[in-house]
Amino acid sequence: MDFKLLMFAGVLSLVLGCHSQSPLIDAPSRVENTTAENTGKNTIEQVEIKGQGALDVGTSGRATSRMLLSDGPGIASLLNKNYNEDTTSCIDYESKTPRGYYFCTGVLLRTTDNGDFNPWEASPTALQLHATSFSWIRHDLNTAGFFKSAGFILLNPADILAEAVYGPEFPRFGITRNTFVKCVFPFDAWTTRTMNRNYDGCDLEGTGLGTPLMDQPWGSCDNRLGFTLASQWDKYFRDAGQINYKQCSWNADSTTGWEKMIASHNNFTGQSSWNEVLIYNWGPAGHESVTEGMRKWIVAFFYDPARANSLSIAQIFQRKMAATGKRVPVLRLDFAAAAAQRFQFRTEDQLLGVYP
């Protein structure tokens, strides 16, 4: 029996608790699989978990099927499932600690330009700030587009640990999984405007770059200002003239912080429609570089069909990734479509000979 499959069964029992209504299954007494290698199929691997515990596939979503990166429709379906969840609790059963929404629900992504660099590379300003800007989307967060028209998607850590898709890897330092997601702002906070923010860009503007936190999240709303309510954030933002760079951030591993972020974001309809999530640029010596770590974490590229030339940019990203030996799909991120079809895989959007 494949050793990796045995490891999967153990990891699966650890991460199913990331969904608020999902029971933790008992240790499986047997794992049976039909692998792509054994059957000749190149897209789906089915894994049957047999044990004494119940497994609610409908709410856990981590259950019995694993797919390869070559299964574009399956990846789109998984992302749509995560996008349409209402989960309010993510527990990392490996470390026995609660995590923020990014860990098991919604979709974490980054838009970027095409240039003479790989799209997953951290920019010089991001390296100086010690963190890179992302956005997080879910059906209950009002989002209608982004500043740029194309980018890449990270598979959430719970799905990676459950090996829902072969290929993406959540970054680790040795055997320890560090807290890379640091904070979340309800709106784009223009964090690289002055390069003058402490705590990996999560602090208020004017606090200096300081030193990276590395192993802990931090939010200026809760950790500096002592806020506990969305109404406090709303008043603070109004008193600051609703200027984006005068926001405070919520600790990324605070479940209530994510709830408040969603509430405040939806309360200010005149603001930009995307939020900002800061992910620490891990490194340096002895550790995986930020560029290679991010490359491994990617599950797909995406484009906004409402924006000109967005598909061609995403296809360039797809070709650049294929040059590294990893092939991932291009997905259509359509904000005009029904929420259940927010992410769409279309065969005609894939570069011939590049994907699958």
Image: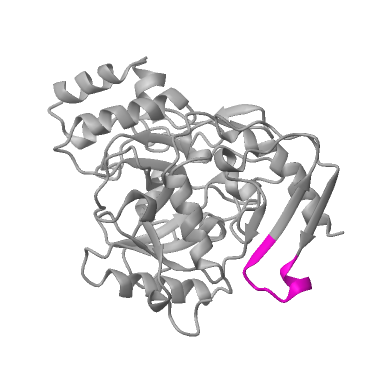
In the shown orientation, is residue 235 left or right of residue 68? Answer: left
Q: Is residue 166 above or below residue 81?
A: below
The x, y position of residue 68, in whole percent, is 61, 65
Q: Is residue 22 above or below residue 338?
A: above
Nearer-the-camera pick, 243 or 164: 164
* Magenta residue span: 35-45
Q: Residue furthest bottom?
A: 353
The x, y position of residue 116, in whole percent, is 37, 73
Nearer-the-camera pick, 103 or 306: 306
Give the quadrant of residue 2: bottom right
Give the quadrant of residue 119: bottom left
Residue 207 seen from this side: no
In the shown orientation, is residue 43 left or right of residue 194? Answer: right
136 within the magenta span: no
Residue 43 seen from this side: yes
Q: Is residue 260 above or below residue 341?
A: above
Image quadrant holding the N terminus, namely bottom right
41 within the magenta span: yes
Q: How is the image coloured?
A: one colour
Q: Residue at x 54, y 37 (%)?
A: 214
Q: Residue at x 59, y 48 (%)?
A: 159
Nearer-the-camera pick, 48 or 270: 48
- All told, the count of numbered labels is 0
Q: Residue at x 17, y 39 (%)?
A: 271
